[in-house]
Image (cartoon, rainbow, N blue to C red):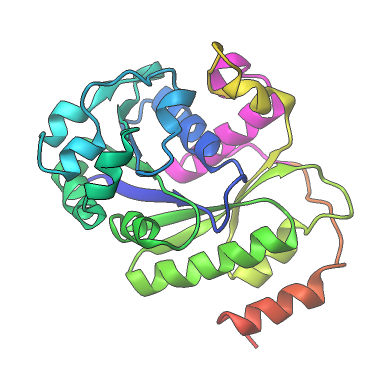
Amino acid sequence: MGRSITIVSGKGGVGKTSITANLGIALAQRGVSVCLVDADIAMANLSLLLGMQSSPITLHDVLLGEAGVQDAIYDGPSGVKLIPSGLSLDNYRRVDADRLASVIKAIQHKFDFILLDGPAGIEKSVLASIAATEECLLVATPDSPSIADVLKTKIVAQRLGSKPLGVVLNMVHFDKGEISKDEVSRMMELPVYGTVPYDDEMRLSFQRDKASPVILRNPQAKSSVEIQRLAARLAGLPVQQEEPSKGGGFFSGFMRFFSRLFGGKK
């Protein structure tokens, strides 16, 4: 039985979909069987990043009971499989997101990893995507609003029975104005699985007519190297040593406040 992990964030705009796509490809490049699921049933973007936006059968059809899950699995880059979400607003209004758990369970024995790209926020579809998997990985940027939101998401995940594995800090500039990796780890009471630097190569991944994950566009990019470290850690393989984190204690008091407010240590 493979592992099922929802990639989730408290707020949008933190690069969650990019992390999901690139992490899945990095795992597949290491010989791991991976299925990516675009569980953002309202605002699907994963298939766009992978250049696979023309899929006749989608997760919408499966959740509506109009297709089997095997019919919605497509071949993606570097050997990954993809279950795309649909773009139909009419179907979105009709789908039963609570059926997602049974969909994941039906295919979990076929893959080493199933990675769900979950929606942002705490609405019903977010809760369903978290509850559908045994584990979750939290994506945030190193600023106080993002960390505060992802802390709430961690608590929700725990209540839903999904184990938070750790935090991926994305779009990191490594300057003193950011919340440091060590501070995030202390406040979240979770390891920081990766610190993915801000990288123009990552930003260019969604360029019109040139959409492609950065790990394929430029394997030597700083963000690609860090995602490879993240994949190795997730797969239990040796991890290349990373540079010490920077950033200061400016937000320490603020983050202690949020930790107390939302269930951390006092």
Which residue occupies the extreme bottom position in the image? 266
Camera sees residue 109: no
Camera sees residue 80: yes
Quadrant in which residue 71 is drawn: top left
Is residue 145 or residue 250 the one in the foreground?
Answer: 145
Quadrant in which residue 37 is drawn: top left
Is residue 161 or residue 41 the one in the foreground?
Answer: 41
Q: Main secondary structure of the magenta part?
A: helix
The residue at 29%/44% (across/down) is 92
Residue 129 location (% of width, % of height): 34, 54
Is residue 243 or residue 184 the one in the foreground?
Answer: 184
Query: Does residue 39 sit above or below 201 in this rendering?
Result: below
The residue at 63%/36% (across/down) is 240
Residue 124 location (% of width, % of height): 35, 61
241 drawn magenta: yes
233 drawn magenta: yes
Query: Does residue 115 sit above or below 158 in this rendering?
Result: above
The residue at 44%/22% (across/down) is 50
Query: Does residue 7 sit above or below 74 in this rendering?
Result: below
Residue 43 location (% of width, % of height): 43, 40
Is residue 227 or residue 232 the one in the foreground?
Answer: 227
Residue 24 location (% of width, % of height): 43, 32
Quarter of the image for the C terminus: give it.
bottom right
Write the start and end of the magenta stretch as one range. Answer: 215-242
The reply, left or right, for residue 263 in relation to residue 223 is left
